Image (cartoon, helix red, strand yellow):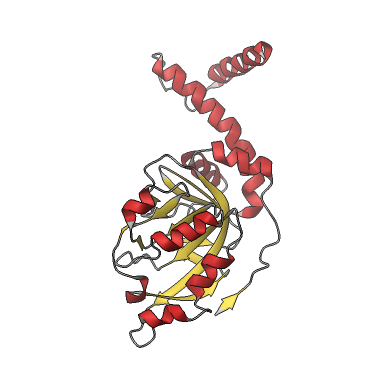
Amino acid sequence: MSIINDYPHAELSNLTRERLMRASTASLHTLLHKRGLKNTYIQNVGRMNKSQVKMVGQAYTLRYIPAREDLDVVAAFRDPEHPQRLAVESVPPGRVLVSDCRQDASAASAGSILLTRLQVRECAGFVSDAGVRDSEYAESMSMPVFCTKPSAPTNLTKHHAVDIQQPIGCGGVPVYPGDVLVGDGDGVMVVPLELADEIAEEASGMEAFEAYVLDKVNNGAAVIGLYPPNEQAQEEYQAYLREQKSRG
């Protein structure tokens, strides 16, 4: 098993984190797409929580390979070095534990006890391309939980944990330790850490413009020439911003 606990060193700034908390995954996907990054949306993973919790945090990764019957027995969890247990106990506060389960949701990747431990340890969220057991409990949690579907079988039936803090794939997307994960009702986006600041800043302006457009459309405006904006629409928006600023 490989563990690299000091990778990477860079941390999200509070300003970038706050901006990303206000940004939608849809906007982030558009901004990354403009930069040529097209495989950044984790496929077939959705939010389990009943409440509309938002997730922002850097990735702390856990990789699984297919299970083997002679190794993956219930007694395996007694091993204090079991990678799944180590990941739960070593993920720093504010990070998102991301599990690479090879997009196999026929077994769970966590249940109520491990998810509760992550929540108590102030983990920013849990993301897995497998299932989650005790799903009704997970639905009630304040910590964001994203997975493929409810799944009762223990992870031992399909998943053998091997690596912590190594590059992984989750839902078909590469995730490097320290990448920024943003999750909402549409799913989870992976933002490369080195792009997080500029993406977050641009997303703030994009979200403000789209709120303006939505208000216009609700009041009967047509989308042609407005979204995306032609020159006249851009001038009207700038005038709107000046008016808003003058009002304080």
Q: Position of residue 119 (x, y in %)?
A: 50, 54
In this view of the protein, which residue sits in the foreground, 53 or 121?
121
In this view of the protein, which residue sits in the foreground, 187 or 223?
187
Q: Position of residue 130 (x, y in %)?
A: 37, 63
Displayed quadrant of residue 102: bottom left
Residue 83 relative to residue 199: left or right: left
Residue drawn at (56%, 58%), measured in percent from left and top?
59
Q: Position of residue 219 (x, y in %)?
A: 41, 13
- Image quarter in which the C terminus is found: top right
Q: Position of residue 20 (x, y in %)?
A: 58, 41
Compared with 55, 108 (above or below) is below
Compared with 41, 185 (above or below) is above
Compared with 65, 37 (above or below) is above
Residue 58 relative to residue 223: left or right: right
Query: Can I make out residue 225 in this image?
Result: no
Residue drawn at (58%, 78%), measured in percent from left and top?
2
Displayed quadrant of residue 128: bottom left
Which residue of the protein is positioned furthest toward the bottom in this rendering? Answer: 70
In this view of the protein, which residue sits in the foreground, 43 or 119?
119
Residue 135 relative to residue 187: left or right: left
- Image quarter in which the N terminus is found: bottom right
Residue drawn at (28%, 64%), measured in percent from left and top?
152
How many numbered marks are there?
Answer: 0
Displayed quadrant of residue 77: bottom left
